[in-house]
Image (cartoon, coloured by chain):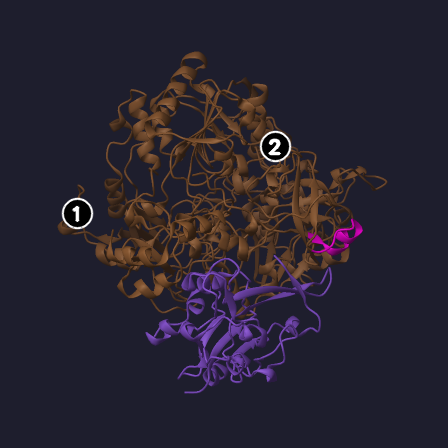
Amino acid sequence: MSSLLKKITDNKISRRSFLKATAAGTASLALTGCGSGLASVDGNINALGEEQGEWVSAACWHNCGGRCLNKALVVDGVVVRQKTDDTHEDSPDYPQQRGCLRGRSQRQQVFGADRLKYPMKRKNWQPGGGDKSLRGKDEWERISWDEALTYIADELQRVKKDYGNRSILHIGGWSSRITDISRTLGLFGGYAEYWNTNSFGSWAMTPKKVGFLQLGVWDQTVNDRFDMRNCETVIMLSMNPAWSAMGSSSWHYLQAKKAGAKFIGIDPFYNESYSMLGAEWVPVRPSTDSALLLAIANVLLTKDHPTMNPLIDWDFLNKYCLGFDADHMPEGEDPKGNFKDYVLGTYDGVPKTPAWASEICGVDKVQIEKLALEFRKDKKVAFLCGMASARTTNSDNLPQLIMTIGAMTGHMGKSGHMTGSTMHATSGNGGPALVCAGSNGLPGIANPVDDSINAGEVWDAILTGKYTFTGSGDFTSADQYKSGEQRDIDIHIIYHSGGATLQTSDGMTKGIEAHRKVDLVVSHSQFVTTNSKYADIVLPVTTEWEKVGGFSGGSLVHSGNREMLIMYSQISEPLFEAKSDQWIANELAKKLGLNEKEAFPFDEKQQFFNALASATVVNEDGKTYGPLVTITDADIKELGVTGKPQTGKITYPELKEKGVYQVKRSQGDNYGYIAYEDFVKDPENNPLTSESGKLEIYSRQLAKTVNDMGFSKIQAIPSYIPPVNGYQDTFQDWESKAKGEYPYQVINPHYLRRSHTVFDNVKWLQEAWHNPVFLNTKDAQANGIGNGETVLITSPYGKILRNACLTERVRPGVVALPHGAWVDVDEKTGIDKGGADNILSGQVPTGQGVSGFNTGIAKIEKYSASKLISDVEKPARIVF
Amino acid sequence: MGKLGFYFDMEACIGCRTCQIACKDKNNNKIGVLYRRVRNFETGVYPRPDGFNYSSSCNHCAEAKCVKGCPTGAMHYAEDGTVQHNKDKCIGCKYCIWNCPYGAPQFLEESGIVGKCDSCKSLRDQGENPACVDACIMRCLEFGDLEELKAKHGADLVQELSVLPEANLTEPSVLIKPKSCAMDANPREKEV
């Protein structure tokens, strides 16, 4: 044991105080050097060690939309403190990559007392399943790695022999193909996949069909952050960067405000972003944005006058779009099917007027008219949206409609004008990556099984043995979105090796039932997450702090802004018996009699080096790219890898010390970005991804693709299709407006206590953010619910409890339940005390396989049986 | 050098609580102990609500009640004028907790004494900023000479809000750039 650790442990820790701390669920520091695992030390460690420590670049790797510089002060292997970017002076033009509260709590997560320490088996599980009904409530038994891997390998062999590889469902978060274990299972003969549209809703497929994407993705149709300062008006639809796009996004929007832009927020929730930006609020009902936007199109058409009131950019529509009016329809299509006549009600007799929309979307018709005029073509307007409005059922035309409004008003392709989704990693700052992460160099391994089950059907598929096959792979796969085909499927193993799918996928109540049906559930995790709670064999995996190091930022998926790349280093040896996912994949390959060298031809250190050597950075011309890192023979020797020296912009030792490489930006530099600039200059030579190469307001391919999949039907033009579980379903009789059993609409805002589900077990964050349910004050009072009181929320699919926060910032009729809380079902009552959003959602596939997280209905009532204790007071889930 | 204190730009604050966590991390505080905390307030009614956040720590007051009321001299003024706390002299009598109108001093159950924001004096002595200042992702917080901060950020800064005690009680060393709604008479505090 090192001297510092000895000093601390001798003076400060007794076994009694350690047990007291862990029993209370207090997050603890790990004394990794002493080999005995986690222990609790008090604040004096700072005074003891700070001066002797070393700041090391530490990973922050979660799916939050940001990628920020995290540094850990490591003293003799103990992390005593964290900090963020201080590698250069900070300014709005050249901002430090500052981390948020979650990243700043990272050591509490990595070294939490609730980290899983050993492989575990559910007591009443045995090969074939044992007592399956006890999943989620059984006791855990510690087992060895050899036992765990032998159980798993034997079950995989048995199920493959008896039922075939397609009876093994492997789930890896947003894609089954991205995990380490997918390589082993691929070599083993394959696995059924799980796919979903994730957070993206109908942005997953629609943009490509209608030409509403740039740089190959849908969230690059917005100009870069410097150009946003040129906007006069910024209209935001269902956005909240303050809670869902960390890093510098909110700060970028503030610069636009300081430059004089006026902000408008269209949303059921007057959130922190709108409040900070001083936005005017348009309180729209959830999942009714299509109706609102159609009425805006109607106002633009009926109020437009070329000289007196120039609202519509006809030149733009005529030159760049297809299907807006009868004169610009695709060849062979009925001219009556155009968008303009639908909006005016020429043939269906229903003009989509503000009065028509107001009944649906709840926005006053005068406010709709006023809002429509804000889009006018003679102002510099940014029409921006997040993804929340598209995480709704029957929303397949919504991205197309947003594009249509932008095209009608000409807010595309020039400075100060922009339209589209700007979200997550790209929020407020479009453009190609200026620093690009490299590749680890591992060759791909194919999955011989073609089955892939949509999130909206996956639990039903396990329970009923039937599902709709719409192609292979995930939502980005070229083989997805095919014609639907009904297939039988007989799942016997669920293998979770990444993600938090039982928690974050639609219809958790059915998901739990499905988990209680199969023969074996395996889960890799660091805590008793929801996936692991309902598993049979749980394998403790390392965090990024315990691995050789890696990269985040640049062009990686889910990986932060375009201007920088972060390189993080190893902070700690693996805790207890935790192993990396890759080690598990390797060892399982051996147990299955496979050649593990085929799965992983070289080790994690070599993979790290390959990524280091292949990272690139933009040259000063803003167009060409060269190697990022200068690597010497000495570096290669020190790393113990195979490679060649190279010359780049920063040496390996400097990158390691700083932890980040950032391109210095300034107004007017060569790195700016105007989306659609090339297309607008020369549409013939820069065709878009749609069938016609134009912006398709009438899209044959979109309609055909969705309709052939078979979940539900849409039109080729944007139209209002009432969502499943939407506003109209809150009535038992729409005509007489008699309310039904579930009179409220539920939305699931992203929440700063966690990144989706990650960090939700961290006590510091539970203390900072209480996770109430947000109710409109009058709605709460009408149901006898006071501020802070416990509310029972019941949907057609499940029941949850939360304490109420009464607010004027949620529109009446809406229940805003924060997304991602870990489920905590009371087995006596069946009620979830954790407040899990997906207990309230069902298995309802529509359109392109969209998960309708923001289309939900519920009733609310005061829960008198007992007051829910706050999450921070709950004991941590410590098994051993 | 003039009086030192914090500047808080409420207009830019998104209430994220990164400052609160950075403070917690710097001081290794247990659950229940917050040397800096962020509170969330709401004003107005639907459909025109508004809200503001207030991030606060020890205000290092010029007329600090905690210093005056401390029977052992544990609470004292440092040479730079900030209010500091000497652990070795503290007997855990909690007089400072009762006397401080801002709720800044906190009782530490484990050690039986008090703790509070020391404006990260150890960091400042090395030329760095307090942890909360360098953590803020909206750059709302600064620490420095109050006269210089006033010159930098304009004249419309305040030292009290309707949710705070009157400034003349303790002469807090804090400058707030308020949102206009924060001057409302009756903001409602929300537990978010």
Frontmost residue, A291 versus A502: A502
Frontmost residue, A606 versus A621: A606
- Residue flagged by tag 1: what amino acid is it? Ile
Residue A405 at x, y = what percent? Answer: 62, 50
Q: Residue at x 53, y 60 (%)?
A: B32
Q: Residue at x 30, y 30 (%)?
A: A586
Q: Is residue A783 magenta?
A: yes
How packed mark 2 is, by other alpha carbons closer than 10 Å (few <14, some 14-19, many 20 or more), is many
What residue is disc 2 on?
A509
Q: Is residue A291 visible?
A: no
Q: Residue A417, labelled with which disc?
A: none
Q: Is residue A809 magenta?
A: no
Q: CA distance from mark 1 to mark 2?
A: 52 Å
The quarter of the rendered structure image containing the C terminus of chain A is top left
SS at circle 2? helix
In the image: residue A652, left or right of residue A225: left
Label 2 is found on which chain of the structure?
Answer: A
The image shows residue A491, relative to residue A838, as above or below, that is: above
- Rendered colour, chain B: purple
The image shows residue A745, relative to residue B181, as above or below, that is: above
- The span shown in magenta is A775-787
Query: Farthest residue in the right direction?
Result: A736
What residue is disc 1 on?
A636
- Rendered colour, chain A: brown
Q: Of discs 1 and 2, which sits in the foreground?
A: 2
